[in-house]
Image (tube, helix red, strand yellow):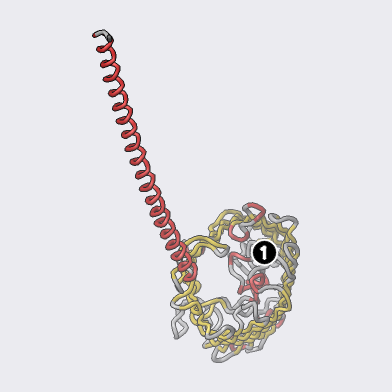
Amino acid sequence: MTSPKTCILAAVAGVLSASAAFADTDVQKQIADLQSQVAQLEARQAAGSKEMAATIDAVLRDAERRSQLAADMGSGAGYDGNGFFIRGGTWELRPEFLFQFMSISDWRDNTTEKGSQTDSGYEIHRAEFGASGTAFTKDLTYNFLWNTDSDDGGGVSLLDAYVVNMLNDNIGLRSGQYTANVTHEEWVGDGKQLAAERSLFDAALAGYSQRVQGTALLYGNYNDKNPINAEVAFEDGANSMNTNYLDRGNSYPSRPNWGMYGRAEYKASGSWVNYQDFTAKGVKKDNLLVIGGAVAYDQFGDGNLWGGTADVMFKTPEALSIYGAVFVRYIDGGVMDLMDDDSRTDWGALVQVAYLINPQIELFGRYSYIKYDGDLLDEFDDSEAEDNFHEITLGMNYYMGKNGDAGHRAKITVDVNILPNGSPGQITNLGYIGDSNFDAEINLRAQFQLML
């Protein structure tokens, strides 16, 4: 017979067993519920990730499409090998700036007042600013350029204002005010010269045309696919810049009524882009060889002026550069209103050589010669005057930046110029005072250049 105590213990054990079974069932249910919720969260996360990935992919594709479209249209702003630019479709704007700060010391052997004399000082040699680019179509380019004149107290004057419209790959028109493309030294930009300034040959003889107002018919336009570049221009006459149609407004005592010139150049090898300066820096592969020539005519009403030139340029990759030119000028008596209306013929020659001893340092030498017609001296009863002028230039360019990669955009130029017979006159742009009474003049120039 089972005792009451035993029955009670059995009942309690049964209750506890039932409770434990119930509790275990409840925990399992909770775990199952949690697993279900985790699975739902993972599913939602996976779906969200797919949606996010799809969104990111769509954004990237749209950005790529827009970037490609912008690239195709040439839109944007930045800096490249030609400087800063702002571009939108066929429109392009390139701001231009040239700053030249020069130190000059000029010694003359026999001045009238003080005998031998030296003058020295500093000047803002050039501060040019302007803009160039394309408008409406890639075939329509423009160029505007102003300069502050140190001889005029910093006054601003217009240098260039012209447009070029290429009718096809080879034929085009240039209209406005621009440098006459007669001599190559005058045509090359102010910031791309070899020495601190152009030669005496250019300043006192060959570069008389300077800037003109007119229209030129272009062939080639320095397109590398064409080895020939040529132009024929009808213009308002030599140095007609900033004049009206009556040729008034220029300080020259005698103004031509009109003028014209023609120039042709043949590129035997190399790239036309390397023809735009006088250094071999930037020549990467082939040698450059260009032969050029020009004829110019100016009509003065009672007289005529003819000019003719021939020149050659040769460069090797990152090493040697050679340039030579000759120029002949014929003037009949009606142009200069000479005493007995005699004509005169002047001529000159130039040769310059440069060599890059490393990517940053370039040594150069230049010799220029001018022979004025001796008959002119007799007409002015000045038998003591000199009609032969020599200029000997030795110098160095230091191109800034890593391995000189700034090129003309940042460079230091130092040169010494020896004139055994002095200068034919005061040529302040070169730093020549010209009062040595045809005795020796020596000029030392140091220039820092920044071009953007």
Q: Quadrant of residue 54?
A: bottom left
Q: Nearer the viewer, residue 104 or 28?
A: 28
Q: Nearer the viewer, residue 254 or 58?
A: 58
**Circle 1 residue:** 282
In screen coordinates, is 27 left or right of 295? left
Q: State the SS at label 1.
A: loop
Residue 387 appears in the rendering = no
Q: Nearer the viewer, residue 378 or 222?
A: 222
Q: Quadrant of residue 205?
A: bottom right
Q: Estimate the x, y position of residue 99 in percent, counting from the top left.
A: 53, 59
Q: Estimate the x, y position of residue 412 in percent, counting from the top left.
A: 63, 55
Q: Estimate the x, y position of residue 336 in percent, counting from the top left.
A: 59, 84
- Above-or-below relation of 83 to 14: below
Judged from this view, the residue extending furthest toward the bottom is 302
Residue 74 appears in the rendering = yes
Point 63% across, 69% down: residue: 425
Q: How many dots with numbers?
A: 1
In screen coordinates, is 292 left or right of 255? right
Q: Amino acid at mark 1?
A: Gly
Q: Estimate the x, y position of residue 213 in percent, counting from the top left.
A: 50, 81
Point 46% across, 79% down: residue: 243
Q: Please tell me how crowded label 1 is: few (under 14), some (14-19), or many (20+) other residues with Cα within 10 Å.
A: some
Point 59% across, 80% down: residue: 221
Q: Nearer the viewer, residue 11 or 403?
A: 11
In screen coordinates, is 322 left or right of 211? right
Viewport quadrant of the N terminus: top left
- Above-or-below relation of 350 to 416: below
